[in-house]
């Protein structure tokens, strides 16, 4: 229960929400790209921190459910669901180990762009592709985890919302976006940055209802 509360309490820090994504682009323009470095840093930080916290929360929710299932003699009955959760958690665990340190990515963005103007934006494009790919893998895995946890917790007397399978947006068209950025001399990158903010906002905010339901439910059963 302590792990669950700790992961839940870290949400304000890990699930960064970009307010006014259009204004953020305007600030990037009028600061000659300096504010854009801040946006890139926050996008990378949110990707890393949200993935870590979300894995910890779902893993802790699963561990708590296993304890409750054993205490109530329902462990054997629910074992197949727990095994599915364990398999679905593995991709989330893998995401927490991948190279997403926001400080290093920011430094790469600054120095590579500064050394050669031609490469300005290349690091950000690579970062955007990694973030979007992470989001797709993350959402597919956590949807599976949430579905099985909803089944498990229902057996334990806690009602959790079932995940919406249509919320998984799929990967962006990376080749198309790179081509559009090239032929517009980088102008399309502004839309790409806007999109990254909005899609990430939608994802983290969409996770909160499930987490709130878990915390409310376990408070009445433990």
Image (cartoon, rainbow, N blue to C red):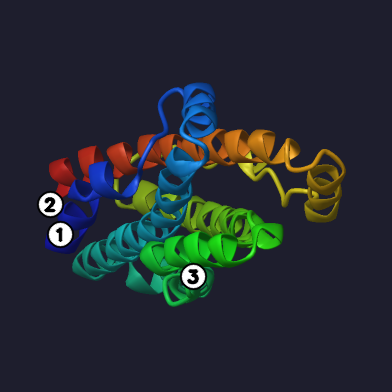
Q: Label 2, label 1: how many angstroms apart (C-alpha)?
A: 9 Å
Which residue occupies 12% across, 60% down? Answer: 2
**Quarter of the image where one finds residue 169:** top right
Q: Relative to 155, is 66 above or below?
A: below
Residue placed under numbered mark 1 in the picture: 1
Instruction: Using the rendered image of the protein, determine whether residue 164 is visible from the camera's viewpoint.
Output: no
- Determine whether, in the image, residue 67 is placed left or right of residue 21: left
Q: Nearer the viewer, residue 44 or 12?
A: 44
First along the sequence among labels 3 and 2:
3
Q: Are marks 3 and 2 in contact (CB under 8 Å)?
A: no
First along the sequence among labels 3 and 1:
1
Q: Nearer the viewer, residue 130 or 120?
A: 120
Instruction: Using a 10 Å C-alpha cutoff, classify the residue at mark 1 as few (fewer than 14 neighbours), some (14 to 19) or many (20 or more).
Output: some
First along the sequence among labels 2 and 1:
1
Q: Are marks 2 and 1 in contact (CB under 8 Å)?
A: yes
Residue placed under numbered mark 2 in the picture: 222
Instruction: Using the rendered image of the protein, determine whether residue 73 is visible from the camera's viewpoint.
Output: yes
């Amino acid at each position: 229960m302590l792990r669950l509360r700790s992961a839940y309490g870290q949400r304000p820090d890990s699930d960064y929400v970009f307010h006014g994504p259009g204004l953020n682009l305007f600030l990037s323009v009028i600061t000659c790209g300096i504010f854009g470095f801040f946006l890139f840093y926050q996008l990378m930080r949110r990707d890393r921190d949200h993935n870590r916290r979300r894995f910890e929360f779902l893993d802790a929710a699963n561990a708590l459910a296993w304890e409750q299932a054993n205490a109530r003699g329902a462990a054997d009955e629910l074992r197949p669901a727990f095994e599915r959760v364990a398999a679905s958690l593995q991709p989330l665990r893998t995401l927490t180990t991948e190279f997403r340190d926001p400080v290093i990515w920011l430094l790469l963005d600054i120095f590579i762009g500064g050394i050669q103007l031609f490469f300005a934006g290349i690091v950000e494009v690579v970062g955007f592709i990694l973030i979007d790919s992470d989001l797709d893998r993350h959402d597919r895995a956590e949807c599976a985890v949430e579905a099985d946890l909803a089944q498990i917790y229902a057996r334990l007397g806690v009602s959790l919302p079932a995940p919406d399978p249509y919320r998984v947006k799929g990967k962006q068209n990376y080749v198309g976006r790179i081509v559009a950025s090239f032929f517009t001399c980088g102008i399309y990158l502004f839309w790409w940055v806007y999109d990254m903010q909005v899609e990430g906002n939608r994802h983290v905010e969409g996770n909160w209802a499930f987490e709130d339901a878990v915390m409310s439910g376990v408070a009445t059963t433990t």
